Image (spheres, helix red, strand yellow):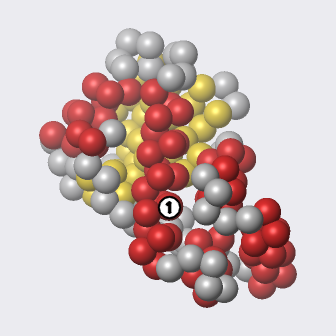
Amino acid sequence: MTVLQGDASAFRLPEVLTFLSTTRKTGTLTLVNGAREARLFFQDGALVYASSNQEQFRLGAILLRKKKITRDQRDRIDALMQRDGGQFGQLSVQSGVMTDAELRDSLKVQVSEIVYDAFVWEGGTFSFAQETSLPSHAVTIAIDLGNL
């Protein structure tokens, strides 16, 4: 059930995030601007996961851009994903490309980049639903919105 929605030019994203945080809401905030879409998942006011439909925010793309993995490592993990299924981060750990701690740090970077990108969108819409249907592959983290 959608409990909050609006025009992102009337209510700026930082205001919406502050409201969700201070009222300790649990649910999913969906942001849409043209073809771009981001989903931010909250648990008791804490941002725990984010997803985006933009290729540049895939974990493999971020790790490559930040020089945490090589192109060859990314391609091998992508091939494993296509052949066997699974998620990029989990396969990276299983393959010894990164540790669990490095994966968690990388996921925080990924969530932060998705949120930062949405901060600069001109316009768009937002809606908040009290359902939190995290993707089955989601690895949750807790990010303090004040630090963003």
Q: Which residue is mark 1?
A: 106
In the image, is 24 to the left or to the right of 140?
left
Q: Position of residue 103 (x, y in %)?
A: 50, 70
Give the residue furthest to the top: 10
Residue 55: x %, y % from top left: 72, 47
Q: Is residue 10 visible?
A: yes
| Of 19 and 61, the residue lying toward us | 61
Q: Residue drawn at (65%, 71%), measured in percent from left and top?
A: 88
**Apparent side of residue 144 relative to residue 115 in the rendered image (left or right):** left
Q: Nearer the viewer, residue 95 or 87?
A: 95
Q: Is residue 79 above or below residue 64?
A: below
Q: Position of residue 33 (x, y in %)?
A: 60, 26
- Which quarter of the figure has residue 36? top right
The residue shown at (52%, 42%) is 114
Query: Which residue is depicted at the point 44% across and 20% down?
Result: 8
Residue 62 visible in rendering: no
- Residue 135, compared with residue 95, is above or below; it is above
Q: Quadrant of residue 121?
A: top right
The amino acid marked with disc number 1 is: Ser
Which quadrant is home to the C terminus?
top left
> What residue sits 56% from the left and 76% below the top?
98
Please state the horizontal and vertical placement of residue 5, each as a whole percent of the image. Answer: 39, 29
Q: Is residue 103 above or below residue 28?
A: below
Helix, strand or loop under label 1: helix
- The residue closer to the viewer here, 84 or 106, is 106
